[in-house]
Image (cartoon, rainbow, N blue to C red):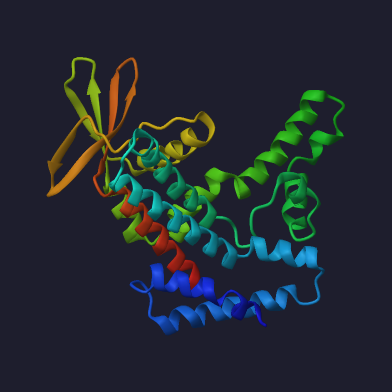
Amino acid sequence: MSLFQNLKPSLDNLYNESMNQLMEEGNFYENMRIKFEALEKEITGLSDVKTQEMLSKSIINRILKVHNRIILVRDLMAKINYADNYIQVYMYPGLVTYLYLTCFDQLGTPVKGWRFFPEWVTSNSCSNEVHEAIESTINNFGSIDLEEIKMGVKNIYKYYHEIYGVKKTFFRFLHEILPLQKRKMLLNSIYVEKLANDSEKLALVIDDVYKENWLFETRNNYTHNLFTTQTNVTTADKTFDGKTWLIREEILTKEGATVIWVQDNFELILEDCILSGIKFLIEKQ
């Protein structure tokens, strides 16, 4: 049985549950078949261990993993909508946003897949990257000064991080995978205002870079700081431009506060962006 046939049930689930409104059926299966055939050629003759490694890092596997995460989030959202205990009310919403945002960096991972730093250093397939990183700082290693050597190590890791770091893959999804129209829709669903200490509004922040960084920090705060301000109970909302906006976060500084608002269907917008990214990757040759 071919790899395509073996994973056909998962592909059927992906198409029927999520992609049937975005792609014509024949186009979906033909593009996936091409990807499977290319992967089959790559793994032919490899050991079982190497085959498993190639499969786990493939774009096919990443797409299917992300879709499994979407299915999980939909189940969580259904429980939020009919919440019957405080855990669902106060803990599930932040988890939903976090899980969706982790899909960004998963889909933004380089084609060859993510590499753990020690693995990257010794990998034959990444040897050109490693050699370039070493050559860019090789003079540091000819020194007997410990600080110079440390700087050389730091520069190599920085080179690696610029390719495989979570921030790099997150922003790669936003700028290289997500269609421009969808990125604009996502950023337009975030409204940011600054308030002075006297509660007077200073200015509306319209910088998309600020919004993108806020999305990344929201993801990281949940991961590293176990922090989320999101529940399905909001202290304030507002209506303008024909939409309802919910207050998501208030960031305090000595000058005042920065208040983040999002559209009331923000989570659905995140999912739409992820599915649009999957469509892009399926159609990309």
The quadrant the C terminus occupies is bottom right
Horizontal arrangement in the rendering, residue 27 relative to residue 136 (left or right): left
Horizontal arrangement in the rendering, residue 55 relative to residue 18 (left or right): right
Horizontal and vertical percent position of residue 236? 19, 31
Q: Residue furthest front?
A: 84
**Quarter location, residue 16:** bottom left
- The number of callouts visible is 0
Q: Does residue 284 appear anywhere in the picture?
A: no
Q: Nearer the viewer, residue 253 or 208?
A: 253
Horizontal arrangement in the rendering, residue 53 relative to residue 93 (left or right): right
Q: Does residue 185 appear anywhere in the picture?
A: yes
The quadrant the N terminus occupies is bottom right
Horizontal and vertical percent position of residue 136? 73, 44
**Quarter location, residue 204:** top left
Q: Nearer the viewer, residue 187 or 5?
A: 5
In the image, residue 115 sits, relative to residue 2, either above or below, namely: above
In the image, residue 275 sits, relative to residue 239, either above or below, namely: below
**Quarter location, residue 198:** top left
Horizontal and vertical percent position of residue 184? 31, 54
In the image, residue 263 sits, relative to residue 285, either above or below, namely: above
Residue drawn at point x = 45 percent, y = 54 percent: 72
Horizontal and vertical percent position of residue 192? 27, 36
Residue drawn at point x = 65 percent, y = 40 percent: 158
Residue drawn at point x = 50 percent, y = 83 percent: 30
